[in-house]
Image (tube, helix red, strand yellow):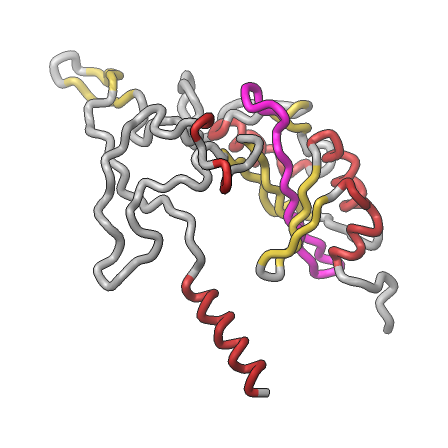
Amino acid sequence: MSDPHPGSLAEQLAARFGDTLSLTAVRNETIAELAAADLIAVTTALRDEPVFRFSELIDLCGIDYLSYGQTEWDTDTAGGDGFSRGVEGQAMGRFNWDERPRAASEPRRFAAVIQLLSIEHNRRLRLHVFCDDDTLPMLPSLTSVWAGVNWFEREAFDLYGIIFDGHPDLRRILTDYGFVGHPFRKDFPLIGNVEVRYDPELKRVIYQPVSIEPRVLVPRTIRNDADLLQAKAEAADHWREN
């Protein structure tokens, strides 16, 4: 049986949406960037139109580009002895939006990534949408398109502070009641602001300022994956041999 909708997914998206979507392909994955104002119309079409039929929203997560392109480590690859030692963190404010590296930076700070699946056509699509306002990041809620996105949007709101306009019950989902701040923002201190301990004299749990020293132990560096580079080199050798 011939395909009633010939062409690659990127070609079909370009033909249907034109300049509304900015399309790229990374490691055989189709990525479409679009404006927040177009999100509901585009996702509704992706869900309903026969050529697409993206009936499943697999995931939605937030991104903070505050420190994109910056690194707190001396190396960009790991040797036989591993990475260098962790650097001393500067807690709150160790990254500065105004001083970010312009060559590798994004023009806006907050974005959401949406992963879609078409079971009917066995295809996946990644949507990338930026918030227009860095001070009050906001996107339209997709709960009217895919009801299952409800908790994903609550998680992005809790961890990144992204507000989803039209969400029926937008409240924190992972942090405690009364939590202040959004812990996945890059200017949030890794050690947090408050620690909880049991006081044997008062015989109750108390809250107090964090007392531990801030230290960055996870390598924060943008680098290419060595396994993928090796696979690419092997594929090039195979092509030359044949």
- In the current view of this chain or complex, which residue is farthest to the bottom? 242
Residue 128: say if magenta: yes
Image quadrant assignment for residue 138:
top right
- In the current view of this chain or complex, which residue is farthest to the front? 103
Q: Which quadrant holds the N terminus?
A: bottom right
Q: Is residue 68 left or right of residue 35?
A: left
Q: Which quadrant holds the C terminus?
A: bottom right
Residue 20: say if magenta: no
Could you tell me which residue is drawn at 66 percent across and 52 percent down? 24
Q: Is residue 211 above or below residue 232?
A: above
Image quadrant assignment for residue 199:
top left
Q: Is residue 140 left or right of residue 88?
A: right
Total label count? 0
Image quadrant assignment for residue 47:
top right
Could you tell me which residue is drawn at 28 percent across and 28 percent down? 90
Q: Is residue 220 above or below residue 97?
A: below
- Is residue 234 shown to the viewer in this render? yes
- Residue 143 x/y as whole percent: 68, 32
Q: Is residue 113 above or below residue 188?
A: below
Could you tell me which residue is drawn at 46 percent across and 26 percent down? 98
Q: Nearer the viewer, residue 101 or 149?
A: 101
Q: Is residue 197 left or right of residue 108?
A: left
Q: Which residues are magenta?
A: 116-138
